[in-house]
Structure formats: structure tokens, C-alpha cells
Amino acid sequence: MALLGDGPRRYSELRRSIEGISPRMLTLTLRSLERDGLVLRTVTPSSPPRVDYALTPVGRTLSAEVGGLIRWAEEHRSYIGRSRRVYDDGGAGDLPPV
Amino acid sequence: MALLGDGPRRYSELRRSIEGISPRMLTLTLRSLERDGLVLRTVTPSSPPRVDYALTPVGRTLSAEVGGLIRWAEEHRSYIGRSRRVYDDGGAGDLPPV
DNA sequence: CGGCATCCTTCCGGATACTG
DNA sequence: CAGTATCCGGAAGGATGCCG
């Protein structure tokens, strides 16, 4: 979603930039976004074939929202890491061990 | 998350207002939020026992973000419904059948 | 009241192989 | 290139029963 924020992307571009995603999941995700009217799929029947994915106007409004969430996650990543360490340390207390 | 937006809530309050959630999932969710430092769990050892959940300052910032997402979903709910109907109708085209 | 432990089913999503 | 089809393991999460 957020990846499509600035302009259309080809299938293979997306696949490469979302490191670790399987073709299956990428297609499934794109299809559901298309079904929901958030992404527009454009097929150019050439050889080799070319398929572009772009946000629809409504898709752009969601993308903005998602972008905010991503920024939040980046900004608080370290806070969460610290919280988890404290919690997992065994709620024993916030004073360091003797 | 968003439910805690305005003030602490008791376990049973949450359970009732999130209709359909199992005690297991509610606890699991609250625990992970607590672990991440987003929610504060306060136990009042009385009889019957009482446990309150409240957002931490960082939790409030996420809650705001999530609130935006919820508003987005409500506003575009019908748009998505329409898109799906069109899509499932069999991509045949946007002109009505003869 | 506010949980936790356990069992059991569901289904998400990865790996792999094949196609227009 | 841009997928689809199939198989399959593991994790998510509901149901149930018990406890401080």
C-alpha cells in the first residue's frame, strides 16, 4: 500500500522491494486490494507482458493513513523494544539487581 | 486500543464492549499491549478482584493513529462494499447486462 | 471477577512446480 | 514477466474446565 504511494509500480518491482514476500502472497494481496477498489491493475499485453499497479483515489487516502502508522512504528520501535526487555526480565521491579 | 481512548476500563467492561471476543484473546491482547508499554495494567486486590487497563502516554499516540484508521474504515465501508460487488459480479464490465 | 491451561480445529501463508 | 495450482506445516484462536 504505502509502496504505491508515489506512482504506479510493476509486479516485479513490488516483489523485489517487499523482500521476502512470496509471489503467491503478493498476488493475493494485490487482488484483494483491487477487489476493494483501492488499487487499479493495468495489464499491457505485450511480450513480455507488463502489469502495473496504482492506487485509486480512495486507495491514496488509505495509503496516507497507513503511512502514518508506519511512521509511528518507526518512531516507537526502540521504546517498544525497551518495554519488552523490561517486561521479560521478570516484572521483578525497576530497580537493578544487586 | 481505541476503546481505551477515553479513560481506564475494567476487564469485564472491555469484554462486554468488544462483543464476540473470547476471554483468552482479550487477555492475550491486553498482555501483549502491556508488554509493549502501550497499556498499563492495575490490579486492585479486593474481593471481588478488580483490574483496570489504561493507555500509557505512548499508547495514547498509537490509539490516535488507530482511531484515524477506524474512522477511515467507517467512511469507506460502503465504497468497499460496492467495489466488491462490482468485482465479484464477474469483471464483465461496468455497463449493465443487456 | 479475572484470569490460566489445555485441547483441537481452522486457515494463513511458505515452498515448489508449471503456464500463457 | 506475471502469474496459477497444489501441497503442507505451523500458528492463531475458539471451546472448555478449573482456580485464587
Image (cartoon, coloured by chain):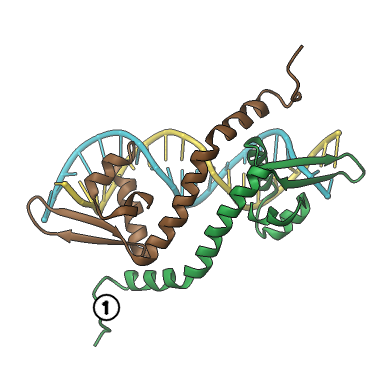
Chain colours: A green, B brown, C yellow, D cyan
Q: Which residue is mark 1?
A: A94
Q: Residue at x 76, y 51 (%)?
A: A8
Q: Residue at x 76, y 25 (%)?
A: B93
Query: Residue A78: percent from the left, percent from the top?
Result: 46, 73
| Foreground of the two, B93 or B88 | B93
Q: Amino acid at mark 1?
A: Asp
Query: Residue A93: percent from the left, percent from the top?
Result: 24, 76
Q: Residue at x 59, y 48 (%)?
A: A62
Q: Is A37 rendered above or below residue A84?
A: above
> In the rendered view, does C17 fall on the left or right side of B36?
right
> In the rendered view, does A20 fall on the left or right side of B39?
right
Callout 1: 10 Å neighbours few (<14), some, many (20+)?
few
Quadrant hosting residue D4? top right
Query: Residue A14: percent from the left, percent from the top?
Result: 72, 54
Query: Residue A15: percent from the left, percent from the top?
Result: 72, 54
- In the picture as drawn, the residue positioned furthest to the top comes out as B98
